[in-house]
Image (cartoon, rainbow, N blue to C red):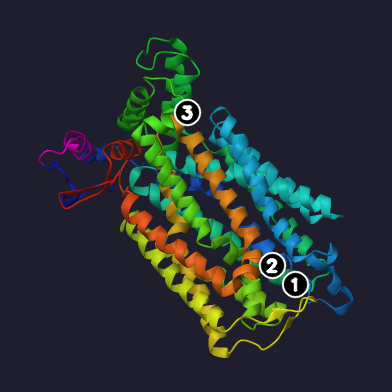
């Protein structure tokens, strides 16, 4: 069982007003040994089916990026059956179609924001699987542009539902020493989905209207997700929260028969998750209930986000991470990877598709490494290292394209003008690999890990919904503005802008983002109240705010 070593103990500095609170945090760290992981194999099985939702999100990214070109390698008689040619799409319309799933994700996130705590984590995931299946089949069978839009929006609503509840469910069922691993492993599934999406684009590149098959294939894992989520146990933390709030009882009082029965059901759910007896899970269940009773003493109002430290600090950290995650250019690099490789001189659609598969494969490998390190090295150091790598890549891309502008599009879809020098083409491809590696070391797995950790249970659903909404709104903005930014600033100027934002992200992370590894969700809440960024070697580094 993972727990803090001696180097992480902090007893408080003379005159520190938070010394007693920090002492309580660290003195209880040893008690984490009372939280038993239980059957880890079963825990990974419970994780698997929500994580398929992440795979389907990634599949949309890779599949859509490749779908615009899929079919162009077929016989000349069918080359007009690509997605772009089938609906006679302009560059702007390509951006709209690409972004519609993100618009749907925003709609889904707003719905879950209102109803997430009532539907339960599992209930939201089941609905997400249904939207995934419907969206995939509608898109694949689209006979006109309006049906295509409906399919993209429907699939996007599934993304919004899933990206809300999958990290919540995983965070709430995982013991402290595995939580970072499991949430980060979900990012592996997203990257695996991107890889599979690019690969399907390559596989169906030789088929007439191959883009239809790219979208239809997504219905298969969506069905598996639905069946699997239906079979897994509910979140014990969510059940305990509902036992308190739905019975309208005083959280300190336990003399309500209904309240006691619901709490017994919540404890039984924890036993099912851990595959342990009630006695073996009693300590962990007591920690969960005690934390809820403390935080629910006062009724919650939205003004609490401005008045309570733990809420507004958590909200600023969470929203800051998701905004920097997007505004450093990640959506444009993923959704328009094929375009970037075309400007680098990879002329044929097959070469572009294979290069995109290569990028996704690198993302998967690096995500695996990051996932293995997240509960060892910690969240902050991985974030800082990852953003630094992104800065290096963006510097190469911006300088390279500013010195050697890519060939212009002559309006027919073909590039005109001189091709990029070979060395520049190699540097562009290398920079892309460095960029996606940096993103997968830092923002990719760490942002959602921390967002799932830093909010108290009684507002976690609503707060995570806000973060998901901001994430997808930012994603839409970056995706839609990438092409106009290229026209306004040139491609090199656009990457230079992303570089400036990435440097700001390093400063933000260094000053404000706390270290949360190996802490229970309840201890992280206390950490945010205390205002400490990191506790190490008997020294504390407080927030500047």
Magenta-drawn stretch contains 246: no
Are there few (<14), some (14-19), or many (20+) residues within 10 Å of tag 1?
many
The C terminus, quarter of image: top left
In this figure, which residue is indicated by the disc labeled 1?
205
In this figure, which residue is indicated by the disc labeled 2?
66
**1 or 2: tag closer to the N-terminus:** 2
Q: Which of the pair 340/72 is nearer the observer?
A: 340
Query: Relative to 473, is 99 on the left or the right?
Result: right
Query: Relative to 325, is 386 on the left or the right?
Result: left
Separation of residues labelled 1 and 2 (CA atoms): 9 Å
Residues in magenta, as a range: 14-27
User: What is the secondary structure assignment of the residue under circle 2?
Assistant: helix
**Above or below: residue 505 compared with residue 124:** below
Q: Is residue 312 visible?
A: yes
User: What is the secondary structure assignment of the residue under circle 3?
Assistant: loop
Separation of residues labelled 3 and 1 (CA atoms): 50 Å
Marker disc for residue 302? 3
């Amino acid at each position: 069982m993972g727990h803090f070593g001696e180097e992480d103990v902090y007893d408080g500095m003379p005159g520190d007003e938070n010394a007693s609170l920090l002492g309580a945090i660290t003195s209880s760290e040893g008690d984490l040994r009372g939280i038993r992981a239980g059957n880890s194999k079963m825990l990974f099985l419970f994780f698997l089916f929500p994580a398929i939702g992440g795979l389907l999100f990634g599949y949309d990214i890779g599949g859509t990026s490749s779908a615009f070109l899929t079919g162009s390698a077929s016989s000349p008689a069918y080359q007009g059956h690509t997605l772009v040619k089938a609906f006679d799409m302009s560059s702007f319309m390509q951006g709209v179609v690409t972004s519609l799933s993100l618009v749907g994700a925003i709609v889904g996130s707003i719905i879950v924001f209102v109803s997430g705590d009532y539907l339960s984590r599992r209930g939201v995931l089941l609905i997400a699987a249904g939207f995934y299946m419907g969206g995939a089949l509608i898109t694949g069978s689209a006979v006109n542009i309006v049906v295509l839009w409906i399919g993209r929006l429907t699939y996007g609503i599934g993304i919004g539902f899933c990206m809300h509840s999958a990290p919540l469910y995983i965070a709430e069922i995982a013991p402290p020493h595995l939580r970072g691993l499991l949430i980060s492993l979900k990012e592996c599934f997203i990257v695996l989905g991107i890889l599979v999406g690019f690969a399907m684009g390559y596989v169906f590149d030789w088929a007439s209207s191959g883009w239809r098959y790219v979208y239809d294939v997504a219905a298969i894992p969506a069905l598996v997700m639905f069946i699997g989520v239906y079979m897994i146990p509910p979140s014990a933390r969510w059940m305990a929260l509902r036992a308190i709030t739905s019975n309208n009882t005083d959280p300190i009082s336990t003399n309500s028969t209904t309240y006691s029965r619901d709490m017994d059901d919540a404890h039984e759910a924890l036993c099912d998750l851990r595959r342990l007896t009630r006695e073996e899970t009693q300590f962990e269940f007591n920690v969960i209930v005690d934390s809820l009773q403390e935080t629910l003493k006062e009724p919650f109002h939205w003004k609490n986000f401005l008045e309570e430290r733990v809420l507004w600090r958590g909200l600023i950290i969470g929203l800051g991470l998701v905004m920097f995650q997007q505004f450093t250019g990640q959506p444009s690099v993923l959704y328009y990877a094929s375009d970037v490789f075309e400007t680098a001189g990879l002329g044929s659609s097959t070469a572009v598709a294979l290069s995109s598969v290569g990028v996704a494969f690198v993302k998967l490998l690096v995500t695996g490494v990051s996932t293995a390190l997240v509960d060892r090295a910690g969240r902050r150091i991985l974030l800082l290292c990852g953003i630094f790598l992104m800065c290096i890549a963006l510097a190469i891309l911006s300088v390279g394209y500013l010195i050697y502008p890519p060939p212009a599009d002559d309006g027919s879809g073909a590039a005109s003008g001189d091709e990029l020098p070979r060395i520049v083409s190699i540097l562009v491809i290398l920079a892309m690999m460095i960029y996606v590696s940096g993103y997968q070391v830092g923002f990719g797995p760490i942002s959602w890990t921390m967002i799932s950790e830093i909010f108290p249970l009684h507002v976690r659903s609503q707060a995570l919904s806000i973060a998901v909404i901001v994430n997808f709104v930012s994603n839409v903005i970056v995706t839609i503005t990438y092409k106009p930014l290229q026209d306004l600033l040139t491609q090199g100027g656009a990457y230079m802008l992303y570089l400036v934002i990435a440097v700001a992200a390093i400063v933000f992370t260094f000053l404000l983002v706390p270290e949360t590894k190996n802490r229970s969700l309840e201890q992280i809440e206390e950490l945010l109240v205390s205002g400490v960024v990191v506790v190490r070697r008997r020294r504390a580094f407080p927030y500047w705010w």
